Amino acid sequence: MAQLTMGGVYHNGIVIPQEDVPYNSDMRVLITFTKEIPKSELYAHTPEIQEALAKADANYKIGKFKEYTDANALLKDLNNVK
């Protein structure tokens, strides 16, 4: 599962800070990938979390998941997980 950290975009010869990027559906952008991971996101890059995310993604792709329309039903099922 790819992870992306984007600090801004390059558009028309300038770098636009992420918080100032306007939405424009026909705008061309260049996305660069970096190995820098913000400290607040490091937990998601441990081998255990990456393995769990890959397993969850595989289960989702084969339809092995349950949808909830009621938060209480979700909480009830979570409390019953062993």
Image (cartoon, rainbow, N blue to C red):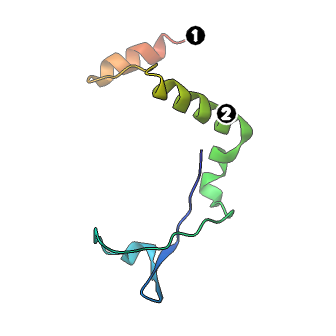
Residue name at image x 59 percent, y 50 percent: 2
Q: Image quarter for residue 23?
A: bottom left
Say left or right for 79 vs 36.
left
Say left or right for 17 vs 72.
right
Say left or right for 29 vs 4.
left
Q: Image quarter for residue 68?
A: top left
| Residue type, label 2 | Glu
User: What label sits on residue 82 in the rendered view?
Assistant: 1
Q: How many numbered markers are drawn? A: 2
Which quadrant is home to the N terminus?
Answer: top right
Residue name at image x 73 percent, y 39 percent: 47
Question: Closer to the N terminus: mark 1 or mark 2?
Answer: 2
Q: CA distance from mark 1 to mark 2?
A: 20 Å
Residue name at image x 39 percent, y 14 percent: 76
Where is residue 72 shown, x and y percent of the image?
31, 20
Observer-nearest residue: 62 or 80? 62
Badge 2 crowding class, 10 Å Cα cut-off, few under 14, some 14 to 19, many 20 or more, is: few
| Residue type, label 1 | Lys
Residue name at image x 67 percent, y 33 percent: 51
| Pointer 2 residue | 51
Say left or right for 71 vs 78.
left
Observer-nearest residue: 54 or 43? 54
